[in-house]
Image (cartoon, rainbow, N blue to C red):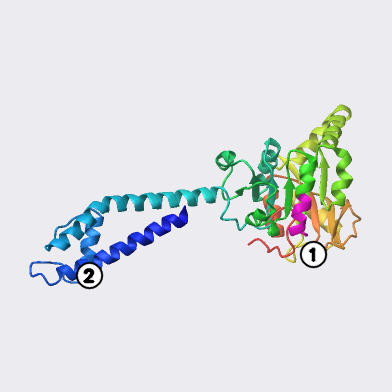
């Protein structure tokens, strides 16, 4: 269709170029003609095609009038064609942009493959934490609804069949912090992960399984984080039965702190600009509690490429660049800590730059 349209445009341009030359040749020698050169002819064609018709230039010879009649009759069709062509091109561009075909420049973002109410809830939490999210959907009818619910500066949508792994370049998966595979069944999740790992060997994945017995299978496939809906629900239910207050407290800590009275567990990477880099864990604990009201509850060290969680480590544990400090804090304290540490909460890439 596009090639045929281009051929029609080329043929029309060739015809007008020929008539343009002929018009000048038949008019320039007539004494009453105002069209003496190509500049005059170009002006006459322009005002004719745009239906302005100043009347300052017009053909006086019979061949010139015939050519002028062709321009007059065709002008409305040409203008309509151009307006339709521009309108179609703009609509195609907007549709391609909405469907994600132009790609995104997001980095250190979260990629969610598959969309449902659970994916929506996860996205809300991620956006509340200030993360950018790229979402892959296979139903184009839901794209506008998602864009209406979330700010475009923070989310990117790609319409693509889930098995078309080559399209994931458009969500910049190579620069993503994590890929959350949120498909309807565990088999599809596993197949999708294995296919993605063939092209993105270093990608990190998170899945929430319907069947707990498949946990080891997904871990063997290289999935970084494997959760089970049944396990999580069972633990919460049991906790609510025996320790309802503890369960309520834990449930609150799992969600992002939206107000100054909401508490949250957050982790912050230790950059070279961190005031506690090179200090001891005890100094972090005392200073953060006394000066900022934050409770330091853990430390993560990277050893041989693996994340090692130290729950309430010894006071003499050194704080090194690249470690992560874990705190319990509220919505009022979070921006203060981010400013103090010069970094946003969450896992950051090795080349993360300090906040300015």
Q: Which residue ends up furthest to the left in the rendered image?
A: 31
Image position of 94 with respect to 276: above or below: above
- Point out residue 187 in the picture as x, y percentages from the top left corner: 80, 42
- Point out residue 19 in the picture as x, y percentages from the top left corner: 25, 64
Going by the image, does 344 lie left or right of 36?
Answer: right
Label 2 sits on residue: 39
Decide whether residue 172 is among the magenta residues: no
Label 1 sits on residue: 321
- Point out residue 95 in the picture as x, y percentages from the top left corner: 51, 48
| Residue located at (19% from left, 69% from top) | 24
| Residue located at (69% from left, 40% from top) | 119
Tell me, yes or no, if residue 58 can be seen here: no
User: From which residue to which does the magenta span run?
Assistant: 193-202
- Type of secondary structure dominating the magenta stretch: helix
Going by the image, does 56 lie left or right of 100?
Answer: left
Tell me, yes or no, if residue 111 can be seen here: yes
Decide whether residue 201 is among the magenta residues: yes
């Amino acid at each position: 269709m596009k090639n045929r349209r281009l051929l029609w445009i080329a043929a029309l341009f060739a015809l007008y170029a020929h008539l343009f030359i002929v018009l000048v040749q038949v008019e320039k020698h007539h004494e009453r003609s105002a069209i003496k050169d190509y500049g005059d002819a170009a002006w006459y064609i322009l005002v004719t095609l745009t239906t302005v018709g100043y009347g300052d230039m017009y053909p006086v010879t019979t061949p010139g009038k015939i050519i002028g009649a062709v321009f007059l009759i065709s002008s409305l069709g040409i203008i309509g064609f151009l307006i339709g062509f521009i309108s179609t091109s703009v609509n195609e561009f907007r549709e391609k942009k909405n469907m994600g075909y132009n790609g995104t420049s997001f980095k250190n973002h979260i990629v969610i493959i598959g969309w449902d109410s659970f994916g929506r809830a996860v996205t809300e939490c991620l956006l509340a934490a200030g993360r950018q999210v790229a979402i892959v959907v296979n139903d184009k009818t839901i794209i506008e609804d998602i864009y209406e619910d979330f700010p475009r500066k923070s989310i990117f949508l790609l319409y693509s069949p889930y098995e078309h792994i080559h399209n994931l370049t458009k969500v910049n998966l190579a620069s993503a912090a994590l890929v959350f595979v949120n498909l309807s069944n565990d088999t599809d999740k596993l197949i999708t992960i294995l296919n993605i790992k063939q092209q993105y060997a270093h990608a990190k994945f998170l899945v929430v399984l319907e069947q707990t017995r498949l946990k080891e299978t997904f871990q063997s496939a290289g999935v970084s984080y494997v959760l089970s809906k049944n396990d999580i629900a069972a633990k919460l239910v049991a906790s609510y039965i025996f320790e309802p207050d503890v369960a309520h407290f834990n449930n609150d800590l799992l969600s992002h702190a939206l107000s100054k009275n909401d508490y949250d567990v957050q982790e912050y990477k230790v950059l070279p600009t961190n005031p506690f880099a090179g200090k001891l864990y005890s100094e972090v604990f005392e200073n953060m509690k006394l000066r900022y009201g934050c409770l330091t509850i853990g430390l993560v060290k990277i050893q041989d490429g693996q994340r090692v969680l130290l729950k309430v480590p010894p006071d003499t544990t050194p704080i090194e660049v690249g470690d992560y400090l874990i705190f319990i804090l509220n919505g009022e304290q979070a921006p203060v800590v981010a400013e103090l540490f010069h970094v946003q909460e969450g896992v950051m890439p090795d080349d993360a730059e300090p906040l300015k």
